[in-house]
Image (cartoon, grey):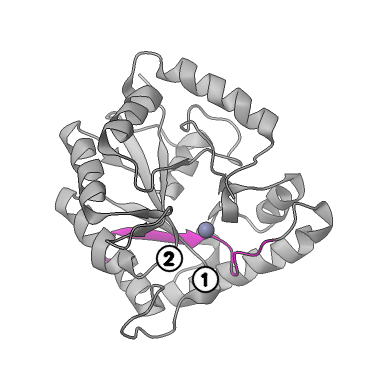
Amino acid sequence: MFRPIPVLCYHRVGPQGGPFSTTPEVFAAHLAWLAERGYTTVTAREVGAVASGRAEAPAQPAVALTFDDGYADLDTEVAPALRRHGFRATSFLITDLCPAEPAPGDEYLSWPAARRLAEQGVFEFRTHTHTHGRWELEAGRAGEVGDDIAASIKALAEGLGRRPEEMAELAWPWGRTCDAWDEAALNLGVATQFVVQRGAVTRPGATTRLPRMLADGMPPATFARWLRLLSTGPGALAVNAVFGTIRQRRHGAGYR
Ligand SMILES: [Zn+2]
C-alpha cells in the first residue's frame, strides 16, 4: 500500500529559540518518534523520483527531513542527531552565503563542511536559490530568478565537486512560487520543486509545488499527530487529497 511521504521543513536547530528554530531536545524527540515507528528517511531527490513515478515509494513509512538556508548547526547539531538513527536529510542552501572556508562563529555552513557531510551520505545539498531574493511574484522577473538559480547550481556543483545536472531539486525561498518561476527552474533542469504548504507527497503527478510542512519547534505530540494524519493514518490519502485541492487554489502561496 502506498503511504504518502511527508516532507518536513526545518531551519535552525539549537538552543537559541525563535520562530524558525528547534531546540536539540525537541529535534531529538521528533527523530526518536520516527525511529520507534519504523520510518525510513528519503531525500528530496528520492521524493522527486517517487512523485514523478520513476521510483516506487519505500515499503515502510517514509519521511523527508529538509533544512532550509544552510546554517552551521547542520554540522554541529543536526548531523550528529541524524547519525544516531541512521537517518539522512536534504539541506537547501542559500549558496551565496556559504563561506569558502570554515571559521569559528560562522552562521552558515562552509563549502568544505558541506562537501564532507555530502560525502558521508548524511546530507544531500540542493538549491534554495543563490541569494534568497525577495523577488515580487511577477512573471517579468522570471529571468532574474532563473539567473539566480543558475548561479546557485554552479556554486553547488563547484562547492561539492558534483555535476550540475545532479542539482535537480529546489526549495523556493519563502515557500512561494508562481507559474513563471516554476518554468524558469524547469528550463534549468530543476524538475522537483517544493513550496511550503500542508500535505504530503502522494501519487505520481506534477513534481512542482510539492508540499513541505514547517516542523520548526513543533511540540512532539503535535508532530506525532501530523505524521499519523498525513502518512500512516487510515484516512491519509483522503486528507492529502483535500490539502492538494487547497494547494492548487492557493497557487503555491507559502509562508512569509
Ligand atoms: Zn529560506
Residue 81 location, quadrant: bottom left
User: Which label belongs to residue 116?
Assistant: none
Q: Amino acid at mark 2?
A: Gly
Look at the magenta stretch and give its main secondary structure.
loop
Whether pointer 1 and pointer 2 mark residues with C-beta atoms closer than 8 Å, the reply is yes
| Magenta region | 120-134
Residue 248 location, quadrant: top right
| Residue closest to the far right | 140
For the residue labelled by badge 2, is the local secondary structure a helix, a strand or a loop? Answer: loop
Residue 122 shown in magenta? yes
Can residue 137 be seen here? The reply is yes
Q: Position of residue 205 (x, y in %)?
A: 58, 30
Q: Position of residue 50 (x, y in %)?
A: 46, 36
Name which residue lies at 65% across and 65% down.
133
Determine which residue is flagged by label 2.
70
Name which residue lies at 62% across and 72% down.
151
Name which residue lies at 32% across and 32% down.
222
Name which residue lies at 76% across and 49% down.
180
Determine which residue is flagged by label 1.
95
Can residue 161 be seen here? The reply is no
